Image (cartoon, grey):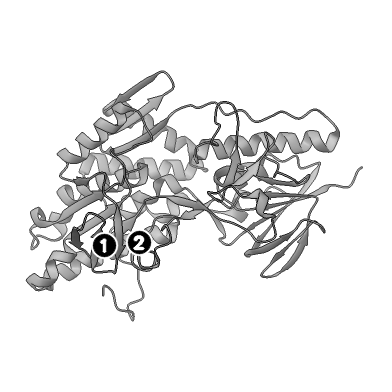
Amino acid sequence: MATKKKVIVVGGGFAGIQLVRNLDEDLFDVLLIDKLNHHQFQPLFYQVATSQIEPSSISFPLRNIFNNKKNVQIRLTEVVSVDSINNSITTSIGDFHYDYLVLAMGCKTNFFGNANIASNAFTLKTTYESITVRNHILQIFERIISANEEEKEALLNLVIVGAGPTGVELCGSFAEIKKNILPKDYPGIDFSTFKITLVEGSKNTLNNMSDVAKAASRAYLTKMGVHILTETVVKDYNGHVLELKNGNTIKTKTVIWAAGVTPNTIAGLPAIVYAPNNRCKVDRLNKLIGSENIFAIGDIALMETPKYPKGHPQLANVAINQAKNLAKNLAKINTGKTTKEFEYRDLGSMATIGTNKAVVDLPFVQFKGYFAWLIWMFLHLMLILSVKNKLIIFINWAWAYITKDSSLRLILVDGKKKAVA
């Protein structure tokens, strides 16, 4: 029997997980490298942040996912650089050699070079960050009870920057718990003074979706009491005051930054590989330009095709399908068969704004409301990895729908540390 080829996969997100799942066990030995020991279901981070579901419901230990895959090894470490000449990578725990290297590192939050915003704003790119937001929001209300009037203004202003799906979904969730849950927990607070503001640089909420989605999302949020500032750009944030480029300011202790992402990069790759937006240029097989055995998939990959001349959207469905196609192609390359170029079939996009409120864009139809919300829930449940977790999340959603409440409002912090500055 021929010696198995060694495949190193960097990143345990949607792309990395699907690739490892689909690689032929008889042809490849796989080393999966990630800084975390678990896969994170990013589309539902906002529900952890707003106390709707537990973090464990959307976090899946990598060793558990692949405990029946005898050809898969896992290492928790950070990749420092790539040596494409010697087919090896350097990590914080040593060097590893590969026959094929697949980069699936995903993206990080884009602060557009503003160090103050990066230091003071909250982000929502990991399960841990979601828990941090949840802790902070609950601590804010504990603080409001005893705060003087001068302090209260900043505490009672919640600002979310970026009106893409994450920003819109966060606003909708916070608006619902403001109405249904927090007044019961904090009867001493006048929640009519709690202000949720959504700041967006473009003309619309959900600006990359259809006109139906743009109009509906804005109408839903406005009716729910969210203050929307479109065509408004943030200049700076020092942890106390948010400055806008139009000269206005907002006193706030809570800014959640959902205004964009930028790809994670890795040292050692030639500069020609990177596009101006730092995505890695790949061919139709997801192979890096100028390389024969290094591939990039998912959010970091920039593949120009006739249908997508500027690259594919950075969506989970793109990452999953690129991974599946690459797994098949690596087997074909290894066995001398003809490879198949990647072609993405856009199945649409969607976002939920709250209970019974969602927007769905399908290739030939766009719609909103209760039916759109049901579709959103069903498709997201189907993407969850385990049957157990699907059931847990469904039960949480059903309970919240019936009672308009949840029991997940736990502040989990080190009691020795100062809570809210």
Please determine whether, in this image, residue 311 is positioned above or below residue 412: above
Residue type indicated by callout 2? Phe
| Residue type beneath disc 1 | Thr
Q: Which residue ends up furthest to the top in the rendered image?
A: 364
**Residue named by callout 2:** 122
Quadrant in which the N terminus is drawn = top right
> In this rendering, does residue 356 appear at all?
no
Q: Residue at x 31, y 30 (%)?
A: 213
In the rendered image, which residue does mark 1 sit on? 254
Q: Is residue 54 visible?
A: yes
Q: Secondary structure at mark 1?
A: strand
277 vs 27, left or right, is left
| Residue 149 horizontal side relative to residue 20, left or right | left
> Alpha-carbon distance for marks 2 and 1?
8 Å
Image quadrant occupied by the C terminus: bottom left
Give coordinates of residue 160: x percent, y percent.
28, 53
- Dot 2, crowdedness within 10 Å: few (<14), some or many (≥20)? some
| Nearer the observer, 26 or 6 | 6
Q: Are marks 2 and 1 in contact (CB under 8 Å)?
A: yes
Measuring from the top left, give residue 10's x and y in whole percent.
65, 54
Residue 262 tag number: none
